[in-house]
Image (cartoon, rainbow, N blue to C red):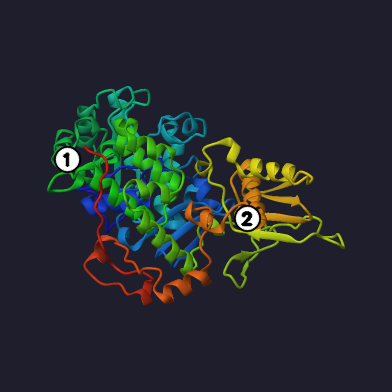
Amino acid sequence: MKSGHDYRNKLILAPMVRVGTLPMRLLALEYGADLVYTEEIIDWKLLRAERLTNDVLGTIDYIDTTDGTVVFRTCAEERGKVILQIGTASVERAVAVAKMVQEDVAAIDVNMGCPKDFSIKGGMGVALLYDLPRAKAILEGLVSSVTIPVTCKIRLLPDLDETVQLAKELQSTGISAIGVHGRTKTERPRDPVNENAIAQVANALHIPVIANGGSQSITRRHDVLQFARRCGTTSAMVARAAEWNCSLFRADGPLPLDEVIQRYIRLSVRYDNSPSNTKYCVQMMLRSLQETPIGRRLLDSQTMQQICDIWELGEYCRETQLKYHHAGIKGRRACRPRTLSIENQPEEANESGQLACKKQCLERDNQNQTEAKPLIEENICFIRSNFPSDNNLPKTKLYTYATRNALPRAQYEVQQKDKLFRATIQFAGNRYSSSFWEKNKRFAEQAAALVCLLHLGVEERSELIANGAMLPERDSTSRKEASGDVKSFKIPLTPSEVNGELSVNEKGFTNGAKSVVNGVQT
């Protein structure tokens, strides 16, 4: 067993798919959790990721090299407290992942409890409980290869004696702790948790057992402690109850839901969390309130700006994103396709700081033609919710424009690289394209149409900036800031930064102000 990390007497945020991203983990720690698990990340996703230091956010990012998305993001605030849970069925891949991330996480956990078909068919999750040699080989490989603790999380087998024997076998690999979800692979959250079974496993082992599965009876910190006591353990991890209201970890009792949502959204903006992930987590907090006017507004939202506007955080979001933009953050707008080469050739940064390689740049259509038409580019993304009527879609507008002016219809060409798409339009003697790589063909064509409409004078640049399709130009915004037209702002940071000043010159942020929320009533 690895030394230097004690799993006893811990209250833990359990691993949850799509929920255990950085903002939720930081929120749980802020409210009093001792340890936090990431969502389960499949081994091959991390193996095709590139580790980058994000100086703007102050984070370490693992970026998917095929589409630029964040696979895993962590920061100093959770150092020593974040446990990476991996989904794996391979000793080699598990060890490779663990060696890659061991400097950035406190421990590695192997998911041996997920009952979903995706995991089982891949030999992962609960499938490992029925393939003990493979399960032990993975854990032994990890324990012998990394310097940080290794744990696993299991479910109960139908036979309790077999569960106890299985846990003993897994303990023999040298792991530091074991999480036990008190249900079998066929049981669901509505089924009662078997606290007695967890207690018998805990009594049979000498390593810490972490009780899991008690959300039905948990609404506050005291309930978590009582659940652990009934299970014969000193530690417990909480999933769904924490997903609903993460402030249950507070010693002083949970906070009203609207306060929790506001703080979560602030952390999501602060750490540039994806709008889709932020939206999903807030939906999980709202639960039945998704049918309220606020819930329906959230359902219709697509951008972080739209989410923030619901909780009166719109100005904070705009100012934060603009500050990050000026600081040169390589967010979704800077995403470019980049296929991994077999040779793993080194890449160089161009003047704008973006990585460049043979397979990264947009291949210019007709580049070998002697009279190539000029290409007009803008960084514009297509946001579907900005166009409630199909009659107002950019492609429809462009078609109408061509018809009214007796011009030939626009010709679209779409390029796909990795999992990203970019379209080029030929229209009225020019070529138009957006440098924003979309995630599907239809959005890429609409984005290119927006570029064309902007330069035809059909769309206004100010309107595209206002609805989030474009960001302001740096030079123009800098002039406004210098003249005082743009207000300076302060970003509320993570817990340890709240009591101290962080100068703009050092990090690009200052500590700051609160907003009043007229949000969801609990």
Residue annotated with mark 1: 220
Residue 419 coordinates in the image, percent (x, y) = 62, 46
For the point 20% across and 28% down, the residue is: 196
Q: Is mark 1 on a helix, strand or loop?
A: loop
| Image quadrant occupied by the C terminus | top left
Of residues 407 and 240, the one drawn nearer to the viewer in this rendering? 407
User: In the rendered structure, which amino acid carries the disc numbered 1?
Assistant: Arg
Which comes sooner in the sequence, label 1 or label 2?
Answer: 1
Q: How many marks?
A: 2
Residue annotated with mark 2: 454
Residue 322 coordinates in the image, percent (x, y) = 44, 63
Answer whether residue 46 is visible to the viewer in this image.
Answer: yes
Marks 1 and 2: which is nearer the front?
2
Of residues 495 and 201, the one drawn nearer to the viewer in this rendering? 495
| In the rendered image, the vertical position of residue 141 relative to residue 334, given as above or below | above
Q: How crowded is mark 1: few (under 14 residues within 10 Å), some or many (20 or more)?
A: many
For the point 76% across and 43% down, the residue is: 409
Answer whether residue 1 is visible to the viewer in this image.
Answer: no
Of residues 178 and 421, the one drawn nearer to the viewer in this rendering? 421
Q: Residues within 10 Å of mark 2 (few under 14, many from 20)?
A: some
Indicate the quadrant where residue 400 lies. Answer: top right
Residue 470 coordinates in the image, percent (x, y) = 53, 57
As drawn, is 252 to the left or to the right of 299? left
What separation in Å lies between label 1 and label 2 (alpha carbons)? 53 Å
User: In the rendered structure, which amino acid carries the disc numbered 2?
Assistant: Leu
